[in-house]
Amino acid sequence: MAYLERHHGFQVRWTDNLTEHLTVDWTYKTVTVYEHLICLWNHLETDAAIIPKAVLEEAIDTLNLLFPSESRETQDYLQKRGRTFWKLGYCKGRRDLEVGRYFYWGNNVQQLMDIIDEPKTGFQQFKLDKERKNILEFATFWTAAAVAFLTILSFLFGTVATVYTVKQYNVAIATYNLQLAQACATQEIFLPQYCS
């Protein structure tokens, strides 16, 4: 879930209702997550569970999938949001990446996997990922950025060069006129075509 938030802009909406678990809202880019792992585990450990054990086990496994308890990134993510259920570990569940294994929430898990496979959004899309899957996009963007920067830089230097060329031309005209005036002022050299 931390990856989905950081790279794809999705937020978690916590719920007390197990039927809303893993619902994806594409409009607001939110994933609804059932937040009471301890409750699921307690129901699983009792013999008189109201909820079928298969549903409880799969709900625990989906939480383990979204929030791997050994991941430091997940721990930081949950702690910032006031959720400490990562301290419970996997609660006798497992972290299974096989989407077909999820009977009750398989479609929702598949939607989340599809989101992960989509290109990143925001500034993250311009960073090279660890697996180097986006090397072409990374190289294309930064090459285009470098070309744009150099184009702007050359335009600025061209403008400065033009301004100084005009100033140098004006100085040359003034110098010419001054030397012409000096030459005409002296009586030793007479230049009839220039001096009137």
Image: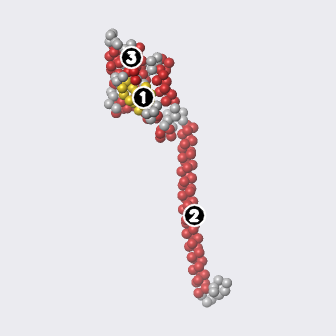
Q: State the image coordinates of residue 112 (x, y, percent, origin top left).
A: 47, 27
* Precedes in sequence: disc 2 or disc 3: 3
Label 1 residue SS? strand
Q: Residue furthest right?
A: 193
Q: Quadrant of the N terminus?
A: top left
Label 2 residue SS? helix
Coloring basis for residues: secondary structure
Q: Of tags 1 and 2, which is closer to the observer?
A: 1
Separation (CA) of disc 2 from disc 3? 75 Å
Q: Amino acid at mark 1?
A: Val
Q: Is residue 150 above or below residue 159?
A: above
Residue at mark 2: 162
Residue at mark 3: 56
Residue at mark 1: 31
In the figure, residue 30 lies in which quadrant?
top left
The residue positioned 52% from the left and 34% from the top of the image is: 119
The residue positioned 57% from the left and 38% from the top of the image is: 136
